[in-house]
Amino acid sequence: MEQTIDINPIPYLTWTWLKINKDTVTYDFSLSENNGNLIQVPDGISITSGKTIKTELPQPESSIGQEAAKLISDAATEGKIYTFEKSEAGDNSKPLIIRINADSNCTTHNIIHAKAGVKCKIIIVYEGGSNMQSSLSGVITKIYAEDDSNVQLTKVQLCKNAVNQIDDTQTVCGERAKVSIIQVELGGAHTDASFHTTLSGYQSKFESDTAYICKGSQYIDLNQTVVHTGKKTECNMKTDGTVKDATTKTYRGTIDMRTGCSGSQGNEMETTLLLSPTAVVKAAPIILCGEDDISAEHGSTIGKLSPEMLFYMNSRGIDQQTAEALLTRAKITATASKIPDEAIRQEIDSWLNREFGED
């Protein structure tokens, strides 16, 4: 049975006429659990079923909204918990790799628990689905980064054209913990991708690097929030993509400096290459400040290929269509180059080859 819900709400409302406060979707939330196939499991990881863990850290929060988070979580009967422990024999350079096929309506509920002092890498690849028959993939990923841990999470979305996805990443960091998120959004029909990070620990850090292509009739809605509560915390959010054809892309990026986070720093930058007069692009970079002793910057730019850049390309025998393809591809490959697995980087490269007719 289909339900209509609001999703990806902006943390603090702005003017309604801007139509950026939320996304509204109508889906069948009859989901079956699908926590993916394990492709590579390094040493030092224990895997159990469950949707909660014991920790002294505060609970992470969601950015997709309470109703959507409950629908997705309730549909997951078991969930998976990946606990990263220190291992004398383990190789921390190898990532945990999970592949999730979105052929039918499914829900994924994964917890990443990095114990104190652990350095770990996780890669989740979303794929499959159909170009004709619509399906929904609902995802909740929780990250608990204990004191002095270092977590790098990569999410790559390569689904077919009829797949709708709600992807929510919830993160909380202990003292001196660092979490990095790499997101590459390429496929799908309607994508709501969000993360919410709480920097509760002293000198904790968060970085994100998101890249996307929005083409055809795709809809991409991004909602990114970092809350600073600990002293001397740092965040750096970067989002870069291309919008063309009759697509819609919405970006909400919020840095929330709460009272007590003195000495903290935050930066967010969102850049969009606009290649079509029929595309719709909306952006709301936000800084909320409840503390005096902080430093924060934000920005959002939307632009097309400049006449100067086009002239430079033309003078070297590169036409406008090829120049646009080069710049579009460069945005994706710059982010993908940070993914700690050569095979997945090559898979993204192959997807781009097909997209630009270079096979």
Image (cartoon, rainbow, N blue to C red):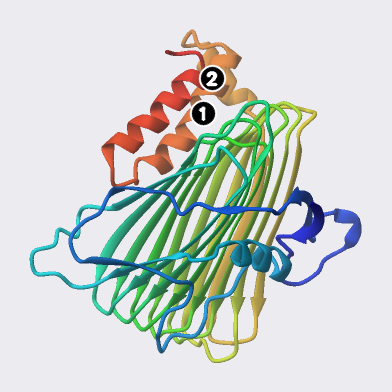
Residue sitting nearer the eye, 123 or 232? 123
Q: Residue at x 59, y 87 (%)?
A: 292
Quarter-of-image position of residue 112: bottom left
Determine crowd level at label 2: few under 14, some 14-19, many 20+ residues with C-alpha closer than 10 A.
some
Mark carried by residue 323: 2
| Mark 1 lies on residue | 327
**Residue at left 24%, top 76%?**
117
Q: In front here: 89 or 322? A: 89
**Is mark 2 in CB contact (under 8 Å) with mark 1?**
yes
State whether residue 295 is above or below residue 237: below
Kind of residue indicated by mark 1: Leu
Q: Point out residue 49 in the picture as x, y percentages from the top left corner.
A: 40, 68
Q: Is residue 204 visible?
A: yes
Describe the element under mark 2 as helix, strand or loop: helix
Q: Position of residue 261 (x, y in %)?
A: 51, 86
- Identify which residue, 270 or 161, lies in the foreground: 161
Q: Residue at x 40, y 24 (%)?
A: 350
Q: Quadrant of residue 17?
A: bottom right
**Secondary structure found at label 1:** helix
Relative image position of residue 341 (x, y in whole percent) = 28, 42
Residue 40 to residue 313: above or below: below
